[in-house]
Image (tube, rainbow, N blue to C red):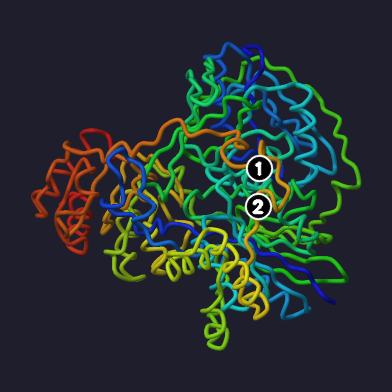
């Protein structure tokens, strides 16, 4: 069997490391000040896809929508064992909410050809919405299973184990299907041989800026020609990550980016600490005893 | 639009309503009163009509009841089919869901089919006006969907001015449960589901359920530990205090991540939101993530060796000291000697 597997991943700011300096004065987060990482649940999705491929055969394509810099996680995925990577990048995609994002991803997946299984992380740590997976499944008209921790094939169907509120369920799902994968699957590390190969992988964005720096005096036409040449050379050596734009995937401009997003951010506020009313209690027998008395008198303790 | 109803998804399992369904009903009642409209509860299942009364007691006027064998257990496709059909027929202006495993699976599927907005994990919902800077249009009385973002570091207000219904999932335990009134009149509208083979493709082969280890949402006193507890054994002292006071044991994400205690005990943005009468934070520094889940506790005691720990400034009572000394003092003081 040759399975066609797609993994969707997002590069996210490392929200665990938000400090005072990363908060702007207006209470919004300065994304630039945060390290950008492979969204943790998406790494689990990649691992599950790779393990399914290793068991049954096939190819794993990793795809990400994001700015040029998002190629970093695609390179990482190639080093960990993905067979192919595609970056969806276009200024028109910017400020998309989950619905516009799922539309964009669905268009890109259809261009690629309908896969057998689409793997997503359960949620991304910057938004924690967990919405793109189910929305994408609906856009592709395929069944979904969320919070998945195990998947295998059984007579042409998927057999998945998924978490529910107080336990778990085992589902049987026909393919094609979309799975969102929950944290807890240990991703394999990058392989040394692949690291050596894919450290040289590039996108057209990388070539454009490198060549511009190398040949500052070239005209735009000459530069474009050079970029095209180098792009072809890289592709021949399997070192090019293709970049797809809104036009490439045939996206309706009304459905993508901010324009295609039904939700709007009305206001963002920094979280303000409640303070100024703390009563300091001395850490002594007497101090604690009087605190307990006060709580008993106030019917907080009975 | 004032006549269009405010709906909630009444999640149930095995004939028992998820408590978030009743929390949502109370919130929907408040929103509907402000909008001068009715509250509809969408109840799907098999032999679950008895739950209608409970929903009505908490504020629902109309129960849309889809009672069908194919709906006995939650499955995405049949549930989404029934709710999308209902929404298209009755055109509610707002639909809210619990941000449970089920709600977070179902609501985005519906939002995509209806091509409408959806905001995840809201901690508050309000009604207000909105001037859209893109279209320069004014919108009266739309839904403000308020949620933490960026790991709880900011609070965002989201609106969906141009699409209906306006939809959101709401965190469990965040909306206060309103008292039940068992005499509220209500109407049940039976719904005949149109479920085809296309929605029946996913089969549940096995279901495994375990008892909740601890239900922090119901605890009136919570003794909670963080990284400062230092070890799995360190939690024994917290358990002792919780036992003495008649409370439950909670934990910060740091303590759970360190493996001191199970995830079921986690308080905070990615754990449970609690608002007990008394919250005792032991060795918890007070990351935003954690504070978001406990800041509405009536009284907060914080015990920490670090005088600069953020938790101390938000606590009503700040104790700068070692929890291993302070907790035994509390136990002795409570026992009265």
Label 2: state its secondary structure.
helix
Q: Residue at x 39, y 59 (%)?
A: B253
Mark 1–mark 2 Cα distance, whole angstroms, equals 8 Å
What is the chain identity of the residue bearing mark 2? A
Residue B295, image quadrant: top left
Residue behind mark 1: B108
Nearer the observer, B6 or B41 = B6
Neighbour tally class for label 2: few under 14, some 14-19, many 20 plus, Cα within 10 Å: many
Q: Position of residue A157 (x, y in %)?
A: 84, 66
Q: Are marks 1 and 2 in contact (CB under 8 Å)?
A: yes
Residue behind mark 2: A133
What is the chain identity of the residue bearing mark 1? B
Q: Is residue A235 above or below residue A216?
A: below
Nearer the observer, B233 or B256 = B256
Residue A261 in view (yes/no): yes
Label 1: state its secondary structure.
helix
Count of picture labels: 2
Q: Residue furthest bottom?
A: A193
Q: Is B71 on the left-hand or right-hand side of A293?
A: right
Q: Is A282 on the left-hand or right-hand side of A235?
A: left
Q: Is residue A17 above or below residue B113?
A: below
Neighbour tally class for label 1: few under 14, some 14-19, many 20 plus, Cα within 10 Å: many
Residue A46 in view (yes/no): no
Q: Residue at x 43, y 37 (%)?
A: B156
Q: Is residue A117 above or below residue B280?
A: below
Q: Position of residue A143 (x, y in %)?
A: 78, 53
Q: Position of residue A276 (x, y in %)?
A: 16, 37
Q: Residue at x 48, y 39 (%)?
A: B173
Residue B195, image quadrant: top right
Q: Residue furthest right?
A: B197
Q: Pick the quarter of the image with the N terminus of chain B.
A: top right
Q: Is B282 on the left-hand or right-hand side of B198?
A: left
């Amino acid at each position: 069997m040759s399975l066609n597997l797609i993994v969707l991943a997002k590069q996210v700011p490392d929200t665990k490391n938000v400090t005072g300096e990363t908060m702007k004065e207006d209470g919004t987060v300065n994304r630039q000040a945060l390290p950008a990482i492979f969204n943790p649940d998406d790494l689990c999705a990649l691992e599950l896809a790779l393990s399914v491929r290793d068991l049954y055969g096939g190819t794993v394509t990793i795809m990400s929508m994001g700015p040029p810099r998002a190629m970093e996680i695609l390179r990482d995925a190639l080093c960990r064992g993905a067979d192919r990577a595609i970056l969806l990048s276009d200024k028109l995609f910017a400020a998309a909410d989950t619905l516009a994002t799922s539309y964009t991803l669905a268009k890109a997946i259809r261009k690629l050809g309908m896969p057998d299984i689409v793997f997503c992380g359960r949620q991304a740590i910057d938004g924690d919405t967990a919405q793109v997976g189910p929305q994408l499944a609906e856009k592709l008209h395929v069944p979904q299973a969320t919070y998945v921790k195990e998947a295998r094939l059984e007579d042409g169907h998927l057999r998945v184990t998924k978490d529910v509120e107080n336990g778990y369920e085992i589902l049987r799902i026909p393919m094609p299907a979309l799975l969102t994968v929950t944290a807890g699957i240990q991703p394999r590390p990058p392989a040394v041989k692949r690291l050596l190969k894919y450290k040289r992988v590039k996108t057209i964005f990388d070539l454009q800026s490198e060549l511009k720096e190398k040949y500052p005096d070239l005209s735009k036409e000459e530069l474009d020609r050079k970029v095209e040449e180098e792009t072809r050379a890289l592709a021949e050596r399997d070192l090019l990550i293709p970049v797809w734009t809104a036009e490439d995937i045939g996206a309706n401009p009304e459905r993508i980016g901010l324009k295609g997003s039904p939700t709007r951010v009305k206001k963002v506020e920094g979280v303000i600490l409640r303070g100024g009313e703390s009563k300091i209690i001395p850490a002594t027998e007497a101090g604690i005893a009087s605190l307990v008395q006060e709580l008993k008198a106030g019917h907080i303790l009975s | 639009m004032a006549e269009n109803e405010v709906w909630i998804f009444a999640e149930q399992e095995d004939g028992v309503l998820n408590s978030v369904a009743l929390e949502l009903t109370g919130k929907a009642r408040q929103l509907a009163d402000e909008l001068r409209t009715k509250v509809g509860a969408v109840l799907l299942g098999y032999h679950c009509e008895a739950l209608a009364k409970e929903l009505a007691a908490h504020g629902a006027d109309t129960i849309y009841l889809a009672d069908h064998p194919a709906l006995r257990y939650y499955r995405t496709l049949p549930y989404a089919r029934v709710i999308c059909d209902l929404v298209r027929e009755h055109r509610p202006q707002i639909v809210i869901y619990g941000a449970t495993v089920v709600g977070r699976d179902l609501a985005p599927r519906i939002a995509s089919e209806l091509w409408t907005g959806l905001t995840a994990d809201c901690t508050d919902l309000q009604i207000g006006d909105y001037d859209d800077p893109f279209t320069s249009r004014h919108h009266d009385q739309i839904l403000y969907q308020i949620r933490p973002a960026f790991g709880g570091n900011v609070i965002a207000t989201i609106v969906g001015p141009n699409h209906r219904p306006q939809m959101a999932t709401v965190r469990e335990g965040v909306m206060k449960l309103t008292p039940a009134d068992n005499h509220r009149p209500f109407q049940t509208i039976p719904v005949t589901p149109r479920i085809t083979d296309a929605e029946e493709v996913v089969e549940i082969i096995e279901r495994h359920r375990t008892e909740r280890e601890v239900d922090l949402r119901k605890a009136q006193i919570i003794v909670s530990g963080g990284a400062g507890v230092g070890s799995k054994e360190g939690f024994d002292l917290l358990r002792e205090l919780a036992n003495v006071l008649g409370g439950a044991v909670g934990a910060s994400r740091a303590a759970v991540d360190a493996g001191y205690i199970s995830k079921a005990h986690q308080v905070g943005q990615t754990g449970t939101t609690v608002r007990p009468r008394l919250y005792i934070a032991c060795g918890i520094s007070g990351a935003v993530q954690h504070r978001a889940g406990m800041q509405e506790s009536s009284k907060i005691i914080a015990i920490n060796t670090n005088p600069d720990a953020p938790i101390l400034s938000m606590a009503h009572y700040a104790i700068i000291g070692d929890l291993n000394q302070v907790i035994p003092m509390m136990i002795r003081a409570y026992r009265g000697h």
